[in-house]
Amino acid sequence: MKISEVSKNFGISISTLRYYERSGLFDHVQRVNGRREYSDEDIQRLSLIMTLKNAGFTLSAISNYLDLPICSRQEKVKILERERSRLLKNIHDGQKNINSIDYLIYTLQKER
């Protein structure tokens, strides 16, 4: 798949795809007549990158995750579980903030 097709399908800019490549998130995107051709494996890797990025991973954390050998599945699970816990804490903290705001709204409306 050409870089323009990948960009369109994933909703990310061509410059972002090039940046990911320069950052080492892709091993080697094949070139055909000087143009990038993304293989099915590249597309699967980009899908994983986007999933991790959307979950809040930094590019550095994504790179570290991708660099782990396939045999270290347990380490990958630990990384994902830590990130999951972090996200759940953020949700919990956000809910506490919403509750505080709801209480302030309630007290203001009660004063009418």
Image (tube, rainbow, N blue to C red):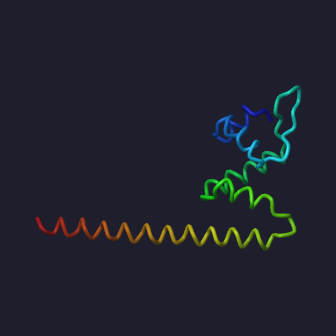
Question: Residue 84 in the image: x percent, y percent?
Answer: 61, 69
Would you say 65 lies left or right of 37 here? left
Q: Residue furthest left?
A: 112
How many numbered discs sit on the rendered protein?
0
The quadrant of the image that shows the C terminus is bottom left
Q: Quadrant for residue 78, please give it.
A: bottom right
The quadrant of the image that shows the N terminus is top right
Q: Is residue 8 above or below residue 74?
A: above
Residue found 56% across the figure and 67% down from its top: 87
Residue found 81% across the figure and 70% down from its top: 73
Front residue of 107 and 36: 36
Front residue of 63 and 84: 63
Residue found 60% across the figure and 58% down from its top: 56
Question: Residue 41 in the image: x percent, y percent?
Answer: 84, 48
Question: Residue 91 in the image: x percent, y percent?
Answer: 49, 68
Q: Residue furthest top?
A: 33
Would you say 104 lies left or right of 68 here? left
Would you say 44 lies left or right of 93 here? right
Q: Quadrant for residue 95, please give it.
A: bottom left
Q: Is residue 54 above or below residue 73?
A: above
Q: Quadrant for residue 13, please give it.
A: top right
Question: Residue 69 in the image: x percent, y percent?
Answer: 85, 64
